[in-house]
Amino acid sequence: MIRPSRPLIGLLIAASLAGVADARKKKARVQEIAPVNVTTIGVNAYLWRAALDTLSFMSLAQTDSNGGVIITNWYVNPQVPSERMKVSVAILDATLRADVIRVSTARQVYQNGQWVDAAVQAATNAKLEEIILQKARDLRRNAAAQG
């Protein structure tokens, strides 16, 4: 019966561990682009961060990262004090796609001592969605470049 020596067993274990470590390094190098689904929270993390960044000039009334909802307080632009806006963002899925984000805005004007609902320009919601999506894509690209 042949008994392997302890140094030989140690050498074999070290070689196998080195092979596993090398395989992990190769696997990490193959993934050159950041994943589309980043779900450490309930929704896509890139869209969530991008929506918060886009609305950062407004104070937030409610946020729910698991449900993907952001609602702002009324915002009065200092240049137009007779008008205020409120924005709601809903992120519907964990993927980074254009159809998973919904933005709705409300607008009021100050008339005769009270705030009155007013129409929102048709392109406002679409423009905000585009801005958020572009920021999310940029965040994903930057994550891929760093990782």
Image: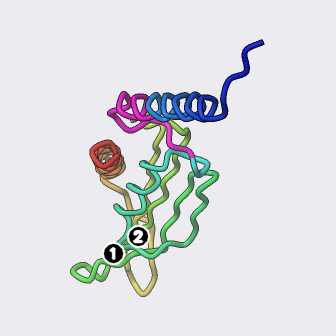
Q: Viewed as shown, does residue 46 lie left or right of 38?
A: left
Q: Earlier in the sequence, mark 1 or mark 2?
A: 1
- Determine the residue positioned at 35% across, 50% down: 132
Is residue 133 located in the magenta-colored stretch of the structure? no
Vertical side of 2 occupied by 80: above or below: below
Q: Are marks 1 and 2 in contact (CB under 8 Å)?
A: yes
Task: Return the residue nearer the eye: 22 or 27.
Answer: 22
Q: Which residues are magenta?
A: 25-39
Q: How is the image coloured?
A: rainbow
Residue 68 in the image: state x and y as whole percent: 57, 51
Tell me the quadrant of the picture where the N terminus can be found. top right
Q: Amino acid at mark 2?
A: Gln
Q: Which residue is mark 1?
A: 83
The percent coordinates of residue 14 (x first, y second) are 55, 35
Residue 33, x across and y down, in percent? 34, 34
What residue sits 30% from the left and 53% below the top?
Answer: 121
Judging depth in this view, the residue of 80 and 71 nearest the camera is 71
**Main secondary structure found in the magenta portion:** loop
**Residue 39 figure quarter:** top right
Image x and y of residue 25, in percent? 41, 35
Q: Crowdedness of circle 2 by 10 Å Cα count: few (<14), some, many (20+)?
A: some
Judging from the image, what secondary structure is the residue with disc 1 in? strand
Q: Residues within 10 Å of mark 1 (few under 14, many from 20)?
A: many
Real-space Cα separation, disc 1 to disc 2, in angstroms:
6 Å
How many tags in the picture? Answer: 2
Which mark, residue 108? Answer: 2
Q: Is residue 38 above or below residue 12?
A: below
Mark identifier at residue 66: none
Residue 31 drawn in magenta: yes
- Residue plotted at (37% across, 70% down): 56
Secondary element at image label 2: strand
Q: Amino acid at mark 1?
A: Glu
